[in-house]
Image (cartoon, rainbow, N blue to C red):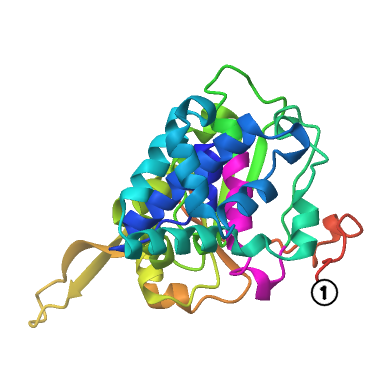
Amino acid sequence: MALVADGLVKPEQGDGAHFSEMARQLVAAAIEVIVTQEEPNRRNLIAVADLLLSANLDGTLEAWAENADLVGHRPAQTAATILRAGDRERGSIQTAVSKAFEWMQSDNMRHFLAGSSFRMDDLLDDQVDLFIAVPLDQVDKQAIFMRLFINLVLGTVVRQDGRRKVKAPILLVLDEFVRMGRMEQIMNIANVAAGAGVEALFVTQDTGQVEKAYGPNDARSIFGSCITKRVFNLNDIETAEWAARHLGESTVYSQQIREGKAPNEGRDFSYSEQRQKLMTAEQITGMKADDLLLLVGNRNPLKAKQNLYFKSKAYRGRFDQNPLN
């Protein structure tokens, strides 16, 4: 329940942090009520949304607060807390809840959410491959759906806690993951992915986006958990400087020769060594479009060419066309 609620409610900064946290608690409480009180065919997100977005929400909260034995103590306590809040605070909480379900209000999406054709455990059994393909102009609008879905996948894996091994390693590819906001499950998977049988591939445009969503410390944790780092097509100078630092330095040896001024004087030789970056930030941003920097653990970095699947003979005939084109 908390996992679903965390996926639905994006965290806010500043004053909005309190309202988003209260909205998250309210959503979790509503899920608990639906799961325990509704018929099996009504135990879905549609029922949760209809309950929380109804015009009589205050009446629902009053009923929860007065019937703890029926709905459960957590929903009752959450309802009592919200009912004690002032009108403005309660309105802000309801606005946060409304944002959490805005993405699913179309009839097509409601129909899509009415049932499921697989179980999350099918991932662990290597029975299913899951793809979330969203048109570029819908990414921000459907960010909550993607956030929720990924939260469920990550939670399924992390929840095993070593008790159950996956039949085959799960490759989790998260393209532009920062656009979904901060996700606590991302931190979990970054720290326990290897032991849980998951290989995570995070894709982002620059390091600044990750730091903005997760903060400097957690961003460093995410980057540090990635044994392999691939850098290409950079336009951001700060990210290029980050890459230059991680590439490391090399030692450059130089020799100086001083000719004697007098005919009988020989040559003087002197030697020196200097440390310099393998590549500067300017050199990194100036790389060709198909160049790639590869950093693997403590091994020496590599500069290589990208293996583009749509240009490679090895992949010819092995991939489908983009369904969104």
**Quadrant location of the C terminus?**
bottom right
Residue interval drawn in magenta: 134-153
Residue at image position (47%, 46%) is 61
In magenta stretch: residue 144:
yes
What crowding class fits label 1: few (fewer than 14 Cα within 10 Å), some (14-19), or many (20 or more)? Answer: few
Residue 315 vs residue 4: left or right? right
Residue at image position (44%, 54%) is 182
Q: Amino acid at mark 1?
A: Asn
Is the magenta region chiefly helix, strand or loop? Answer: helix
Q: Position of residue 191 (x, y in %)?
A: 44, 36
Q: Foreground residue, 313 or 29?
A: 29
Residue at image position (55%, 73%) is 233
Residue 325 vs residue 105: left or right? right
On screen, residue 78 above or below 275: above
Q: Position of residue 49 (x, y in %)?
A: 62, 53
**Quadrant location of the N terminus?**
top right
On screen, residue 176 above or below 69: below
Q: Residue furthest right?
A: 317
Residue 154 vs residue 266: left or right? right
Q: Foreground residue, 216 or 93?
A: 93
Can see residue 188?
Answer: yes
Identify the residue under disc 1. 325
In magenta stretch: residue 72:
no
